[in-house]
Image (cartoon, grey):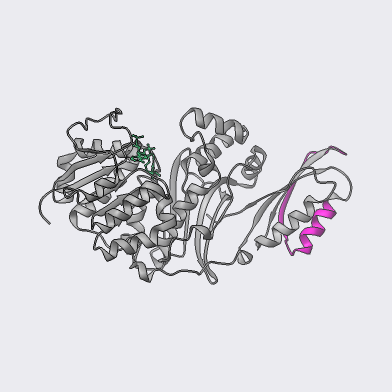
Amino acid sequence: MTGELRVGLAGLGTVGAGVAKVLFGNAQNLEWRAGRGIALTAVSARERKKDRGVDLSAIPFENNPLAIAERPDVDVVVELIGGEEGVARALVESALRAKKHVVTANKALLARHGAVLAGLAERNGVSLKFEAAICGGIPIVKALREGLIAYEISAIRGILNGTCNFILTQMEATGRPFAEVLAEAQRLGYAEADPTLDIGGGDTAHKLTLLASLAFGTVPDLDGVAMTGIDKVSPADIAFAGEFGYRIKLLGVARRTANGIEQVVHPAMVPARTPLADVESSFNAVSADAGEAGRFFFQGCGAGQGPTASAVLSDIADVARGAFGPAFGRPAEELERGKREPAEARKSAYYMRFQVLDVPGVMAEISRHLANEMVSIESMIQRGRAPGEPVAIVMITHEAQHVAVVRALQAIAASDKVCETPCMIPMEAA
Ligand SMILES: NC(=O)c1ccc[n+]([C@@H]2O[C@H](COP(=O)([O-])OP(=O)(O)OC[C@H]3O[C@@H](n4cnc5c(N)ncnc54)[C@H](OP(=O)(O)O)[C@@H]3O)[C@@H](O)[C@H]2O)c1
């Protein structure tokens, strides 16, 4: 390939402005790495005059981002607007149809429409690249798509949302409740004004969907993710986890099982002093079990201007070199679909906490409901002695069926000796 690669940049917010800064500030190094120059030839955002911290006055500005896809002086459209639908989707589709390469950081769009867009890119002979969509600066897409390809990947576990990991780390360090720490995270800029997508697990689900697709060669299956957020995690559970030798982390887990692909997002007990458990604050991490190649662990900054722009530039350089293939590592038509593991098949050991009245018979009642569902106990702690008052009983089970544990807890919750909804948290292998 000869001549400069011409970039049209749609979205000049946190990530887009970061990309523009690198294109101007590190042009020579990028040219050496990419084998040809990379030129910014058009930009688009909502507000033309906003200060982006980088001088874009010499670059043609399009009020309508879709116009970027039509420009003859653009080879690659970099979509950094965001959103599952709307202008971002329209832009990516029209760019691919116009035979422009696309680089995007848009996990929401790809988790929902990834396979269709990958097919569109292939039919038009261009690339669809998304390193920045998963874990910001960690080159995990490259690792899964191009590195760990010799053996079947059996499982991926990840701390994929920095906001949640920051909140859980703070709750553990200070003993403060979720709502208080969330408010602080919002003040410090670690959490959005509307944090629903982060704390509810939706953002982790987007990234997990893409990781699973890359790892297992499946169609991104967002609706196949079973999702629990962190809003019900209490300081008491975090403290008990510590006593049992665990830390609570919001994990995205995808496994290939005999029954199909399992995808879950949930707060989980992770054995302390293991790589995933040791991931602090807003860092992200991914652990991948890659068959005979072994287990690999990746950690780094999952968001923010620098890390995310770094991933976008890596994709742009690949496009410049002509180094690209199918978006998800195999032709879109060959991506497997429809092989979800049924919820009834999910199994794990569980941590359970019951807040019960300290009265005779309460243990017998809990044990009976657990036995009815074939849930057996590995260890137990009962704290305090306060006849007639609420006390905590905490148990760790042997491996049990998820649905059986849920049924047992529903039965236990109905007892007049139980003071609040019982808590259950799965235990995850390190
Ligand atoms: N921020 C991160 O750390 C991070 C990390 C990983 C992935 N991502 C992904 O990167 C993408 C961009 O995120 P961001 O944080 O940079 O978002 P952002 O700061 O909100 O920036 C969005 C940009 O899109 C522009 N925009 C919005 N609607 C538009 C429209 N209808 N027409 C033209 N331009 C429009 C905005 O224009 P104005 O500036 O004029 O309002 C703004 O420049 C998202 O897909 C996000 O999920 C972000």
**Is residue 355 rendered to the left or right of residue 112?**
right
Quadrant location of the N terminus in the rendered image: bottom left
Q: Would residue 365 be counted in the magenta stretch? A: yes
- Using the image, determine if residue 58 lies above or below residue 415: above
Q: Is residue 37 magenta?
A: no
Work out whether residue 196 or residue 255 is closer to the camera in this orientation and state it: 196
Q: Quadrant of residue 405?
A: bottom right
337 or 276, which is in the foreground? 337
Q: Residue at x 73, y 59 (%)?
A: 407
Disc count in the image? 0
Magenta segment, which residues?
A: 363-388
Q: Residue 276: in sight, yes or no? A: no
- Residue positioned 64% across, 47% down in the render: 244
Please state if 139 lies on the left or on the right of 36 as rendered: right
Residue 327 lies left or right of residue 99; in this view the side is right
Residue drawn at point x = 36 percent, y = 53 percent: 140
Above or below 296: residue 178: above
Q: Residue furthest left?
A: 2
Viewer can see residue 14: yes
Residue 146: image location, x then y, percent: 31, 61
Q: Position of residue 299 (x, y in %)?
A: 40, 47
The residue lying toward the viewer, choosing from 253 and 110, is: 110
Q: Quadrant of ligand 1?
A: top left
Q: Nearer the viewer, residue 87 or 22?
A: 87
Q: Position of residue 321 (x, y in %)?
A: 18, 55
Give the image location of residue 216, x and y in percent: 42, 65
